[in-house]
Amino acid sequence: TLRQINAGNDEALGALAELEHAIRINEGLVNLIDAKKLLRTDSTRSGFCGRFHPFERAGVTLPAKLLSNDVTGFLDALNSPNYAGGVTLNRAYDVLLMGWIAASRYEADPNSPILFQLSNLASGARYIAPVLSRTRRDDVVAHLKSQRAYRHMSEACSLYSGYRAYLHISAVTPGSYRLDAIVPAPDGRGGAVLSLHSSI
């Protein structure tokens, strides 16, 4: 009906097309949550919200030593479950990241922080977004126990390995980026890093 009313109005029809696209993404994410039986926590949405800031102004100190061994994870969704071939993001909208990351050296709880980092592939410019809440992932605990390489990992490191992050990206300069997730150590001196996507 709205398309019929606005026939000939290219701006209105464009806005309707964007709305339809957003609704389809939302439906896809709901289906993904149902299919994977991802558990919800009692945390509020604000604990899962973040904003990318240029590294120099982010007010976040990255650990001096980031290790990429004994860390594993998976990106369940980057706005959509179908992100593997590359993703183009619209800076006018928040980005939804869902997945999990577990590091054998660091235990996690519902309030363990996670840092997301965008690195520009051409200039090297970096943007950081901290998120302060985690989600419970019993499925990850079971999965890691079945993997020989990660069978030794403590359940305390994997039970709250999940994340669901709504990230504002308007401050990010257009370009091609790599996305990493960083788990800082409790003392802030070390941490674990995992590459989530190489073509954003």
Image (cartoon, grey):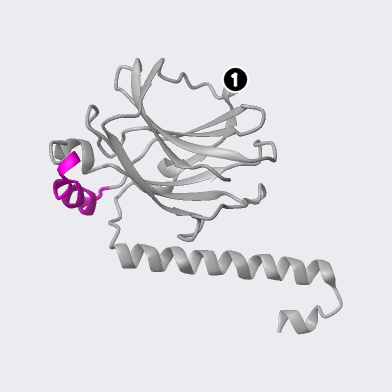
- Crowding at label 1, few (<14), some or many (≥20) Cα neighbours within 10 Å? few
Residue 18's image quarter? bottom right
Asked whether, in this view, residue 32 is left or right of residue 172, the answer is: left
Residue 34's image quarter? bottom left
Image position of 60 with respect to 111: above or below: above
Question: At 58% across and 52% down in the image, what residue appears?
Answer: 87
Residue 165's image quarter? top left
Whether 127 is among the magenta residues is no
The percent coordinates of residue 149 (x first, y second) are: 19, 40
**Residue 101, can we see it?**
no
Which three-letter amino acid code belongs to the residue tagged 1? Glu
Q: Main secondary structure of the magenta part?
A: helix
In the image shown, does 35 or 3 lie closer to the viewer? 35
Question: At 74% across and 80% down in the image, what residue appears?
Answer: 3
Mark 1 lies on a secondary structure that is: helix
Report the span colored magenta: 136-149
The percent coordinates of residue 74 (x first, y second) are: 36, 47
Q: Quadrant of the N terminus?
A: bottom right
Disc 1: which residue: 56
Asked whether, in this view, residue 179 is left or right of residue 63, the answer is: right
The percent coordinates of residue 137 (x first, y second) are: 25, 50
Question: At 42% across and 48% down in the image, what residue appears?
Answer: 45
Question: At 66% across and 32% down in the image, what residue appears?
Answer: 122
Image position of 81 with respect to 136: above or below: below
Q: Quadrant of the C terminus?
A: top right
Whether 139 is among the magenta residues is yes
The percent coordinates of residue 170 (x first, y second) are: 66, 41
Q: How many marks?
A: 1
**Residue 113, can we see it?**
yes
In the image shown, does 174 or 133 lie closer to the viewer? 174
